[in-house]
Amino acid sequence: MICTMLPLGGGANRTRKASAIFMVNSALPQGYRQLSNELAEAPLFHQFDDGSYPPTVGNYLAFYQRFQPSAEDGYRFLAGLEGIISAELPTRPTGAAADQESTALPSAASGRELLGRVGQVVGIVVGPEAESLNILASQGWVLHCMLSLVNFESETKHFSGEVAWFAYNGQLHEEHKQSLERFIANIAKRIGGGDHPRIALNQEDFAHVLSSGGAWHLTKAEPPVGLPPNSINYRKRRGLSERLVELAYAQKAGCSIAAWVGTAIIVALIVWLIISILN
């Protein structure tokens, strides 16, 4: 494969320094990738003379991550109808103002907040994955986060959730970015249908996504990782009530009443489920 560096600025031999490099940490569950904040003398962008596609590493990152609800807002989010599977969750660095993305490199201890529809914090993710996402966001990467699973732990009587993270380099070619957006939307439909597809892509998968314009999304299903013991899948797909709530949020005519009816039915089912477990 012949590869030439894409010139930046005036000099033909100038390449952009990567401010971070990807390293796979074997201690993390499969599908995770940890971003090292060590400076690297590596170009971020390449032009390939043989028509091949950009490398996955340095351009795309995706993984599942479990989280605990943040106080009452988080519990209401997971237990109620607002926690819709495959729905996009706004996120921000811990401590940032609403809808604000820090441009400074975050500290190692920083996390990332998951937000509900009205801006309430429903969960916080921490650790090397959250740090990696904050670094990428500060470098102009595009982040997507969606709810992928809600569990109820029968021993502790607590709810927990799982989110799917997608991130891609914001300086990719516009056509490639559109392909990735379409791919993510297709994966969201699979998650909403109750599937748990593999979202980490190898180089062959990445090429399939880009060459198909994002239509290819035939990754195999994989089991959730890190499930608490004695937990049940409280919600793993979109049902009729969730679809009605989505339509109501979109302010479609006639859907608000239907959403309230659906909510009443689901609340009754939730109460019945909890009583059955406690008995």
Image: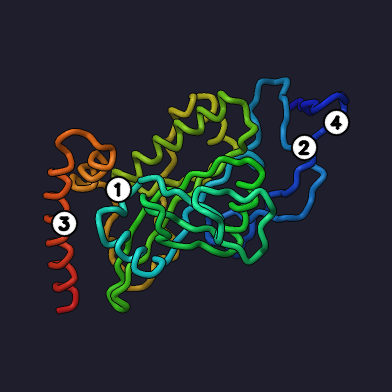
Q: In which quarter of the image is residue 77?
A: bottom left
Residue depth check, mark 1 versus mark 3: number of the one nearer the observer = 3
Q: In this view, does 65 lie to the left or right of 82?
A: right
Q: As rendered, which of 18 and 28 lies closer to the eye?
A: 18
Q: Residues within 10 Å of mark 4 (few under 14, many from 20)?
A: few
Question: Which circle's residue, 3 or 4, is located before the other in the chain?
Answer: 4
**Which residue is denoted by mark 3 in the rendering?**
266
Q: In this view, does 252 lie above or below 72?
A: above
Residue 237 in percent (x, y) is at 28, 49
Q: How far apart are marks 4 and 1 (CA)?
A: 47 Å
Give the residue type that dot 2 points to.
Pro
> Disc 2 or 4, which lies upstream in sequence?
4
Q: Which of marks 4 and 1 is nearer the N terminus?
A: 4
Classify mark 1: helix, strand or loop. loop
- The residue pinned by badge 2 equals 43
Q: Indicate left or right for 68 with 153 as reference.
A: right
C-alpha gap between disc 1 and disc 3 = 18 Å
Compared across the picture, whether 106 is left or right of 191 comes to right
Please tell me the numbered disc located at residue 14: 4
Rendered image: mark on residue 194 = 1
The three-letter amino acid code for the residue at tag 1 is Gly
Contact? badges 2 and 4 (CB < 8 Å)? no
